[in-house]
Amino acid sequence: MVKQTIQIFARVKPTKKPTTGFFVDCEEQSSLEFVVPRDLADGFINNKKENFKFRFQKVFDQTADQEQIFETIAKPVAESVLEGYNGTIFAYGQTGSGKTFTITGGAEHYNDRGIIPRTLSYIYHYIGKNSSMVYTTHISYLEIYNEAGYDLLNPQHEASRLEDLPRVTIMEDSDQNIHLKNLSLQQSANEEEALDLLFLGDTNRMIAETPMNEASTRSHCIFTIHLCSKELGSATVRCSKLHLVDLAGSERVGKTGVGGQILTEAKYINLSLHYLEQVIIALSEKNRSHIPYRNSMMTSVLRDSLGGNCMTTMIATVSVERSNIAESISTCRFAQRVALIKNDALLNEELDPALMIVRLKKEIQSLKEELALVTGEQRSDKLTQQEIQQLEEQVNVYLEDPDCEVTLDLGSDMRKIYFCFSLLKVKVREKPCAQNGVSNGSSPPLMGISDGNDRKSHAELQKLQEMLTHRDNEISILVNMLKREKRKVQDVTSQLAQLHNQNPLTCSSQSPTALQVEESEKCDTPIDYTHNHHVITRKRVPELSVGQQAAFEVFLRDHEDRLTFEDNKAVLQQRFNEAKTLGEQVNQIRIRVNDLKTQLKIRRKQMAAQVLTGNQKDSESDPVEERILNQIEEEKKNYKITSGYLKGLRTEIEHLQLLREKSKVKLQRDFENWWTQEGSRLQDPSAEDTESSLSHVTPLSCMLTRTLPSADLSFTTIPLTGDKHTDADIQAFIRARHNLLNNKGGAK
């Protein structure tokens, strides 16, 4: 058992402009100090506190990188999990202070990887090196949104609405252990599969734009790594788990001024964080009998992490801007209360049931052999016919003896004791039947045993018949449900066909993002170095029309993530070229090693022939053979170094490909929303509000409704009246616009 308090760390978010009012001591005391000057307008006597100083295990200033965070905070916890202890790392702070960036990482550069991908890489690298242990890993990803749990790895997450997904519920067993129903455990054999599961969960997570953060996470997410290890030939199994928690940001509703759905989300987020603070306060107080774990789902799931069997670490993320000083001081105060909690971490060892059964069988067999050696007789599991007759006589004598103090001496043989009890039970059942005239009592005891077996088999037969009837009813119900669903699908298909015939422009608003991006990358990545599979499989969109291609080009040109996407693509292309070059070097080294081995065999044969003919002594050393051996060793060293570089590049390429897929998904969603809004606005121009049109100008509206000088062209705008706008209208406008630009260029 390891007893220790929860480790607390602080990380200061970098600011765009230099700020004052805080001091960081990273060397001696590892403290963080805030200075809040007094307001002279409050009155003549002002006793407000100005300096707020907090101590941590370590404080990371604004220049700290992700590698330093992992080495100091996450690596010790990962090592304890590999040893068999439970571990938890959670980030706490206000909205926009860098919690998600610390836990998950950024999507722009490879060095921005957070704690989760770096921990996965460290664990699987350790598993690959340790060949004396057998490891199995499983991944689960839980999202708590508005106090309801959802499985982020559910394949129905993108096809269904959030309300239609099965919710994760909490269940407890007799030992008060927590079990999560409807939460899937996905097995991952290597780092690539684990990163794919992380990418799938991050894609399905709830994200919204708030005044304090453009991409604010509106839910609590718990990424759990379940690890089981066993030594070869041992019956002891170690099962541990690592919770990596990204809490939603605490924000003051009055300060942000949000409303609607974001306001509801903020209420639930603040409520769950309030319950978490109640649990922390209750654990830090002495002589507290009740801990309110069940007030919220998050505290119930993290019961072991807070004051239980776990090694827990907290990262307090703070923002040192002047407007966020109050929230940062509140976060540091919460961290000081967390540091008072003590956890008792136990080594999670248990015996393998299959190996335990084999061991017990061997022990039983050895005990039987020892008993036979002591008694001098070999026992079998069944009684002989002679022993059965002797026992029947002893039971009859015992029952006929009127003395109440007489005993039935059977020795220490449990077989005889069990058989005598069964005989007494048959005698007791026969007595009421004999009094009622059903039986004269002359039937032997063994016949009574057979009757009992018949009644037992009849009861089992009735039970099986009832079970069969129940299964038939279930099958009929499922068949009817399948028929109804089939009819619903046919109805929806027919309705979609009718809508497509009525309005082809609106119905053809399918997302061209995946197709466009893939076509644009065909000429950029000539190297065949891609993933074997992808987690998210999407249907191939049909060929785009001319109008949709032009609209997508305008949308992609003005998109805010275009430069980031092109930079990642350029970096990925560079890594592909480096990987190809290293692969060719590895193949050349392998060929040279094989040639040197062939030369060595030929040389040894020649030297053996010279020794046999007497031209050379056997004890003399061959300088040619030594030179070849030295060359082989040098080539092996080069092969090891080059292979290591190639392996590191492969990991980086896989991560960059995940970032590219994530950018594709975001680009596709943005274009779908934009295309749907533009289609509905052009369908009904009278319903458009003047104020909203001025504040929300889109690329397509600029392309279709831009006013042109009448001196350069005979018309000012493209007519957009009517209910339908075909691709020919858009194509005609594009040709006119190109002609106008060409005329302007010629005039200049």
Image (cartoon, helix red, strand yellow):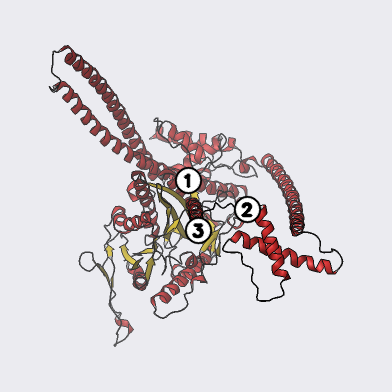
Q: Which mark is residue 382?
A: 2
Task: Determine the secondary structure under disc 3.
Answer: strand
Residue occupied by mark 3: 143
Q: Is residue 249 visible?
A: yes
For badge 3, the amino acid type reads Glu
The amino acid type, in three-letter code, at marker 2 is: Lys
In the image, is 471 to the left or to the right of 504?
right
Quick one: label 1 or label 2, which is nearer the N terminus? 2
1 vs 2, front mark: 2
Residue 405 in which image quadrant: bottom right
Label pair 1/2, CB-CB below 8 angstroms: no
Q: CA distance from mark 3 to mark 1?
A: 23 Å
* Left or right: 517, with 27 as reference point: right
Query: Rounded to the nearest whole Å, what is the CA distance between mark 2 and mark 3?
Result: 58 Å
Residue type for callout 1 = Leu
Mark 1 lies on residue:
667
Element marked by disc 2? loop
Side (left or right) of 509 relative to 650: right
User: Which label sits in the foreground, 3 or 1?
Assistant: 3
* Residue 243 x %, y %: 42, 59
Task: Give the x, y percent position of residue 748.
Answer: 38, 35
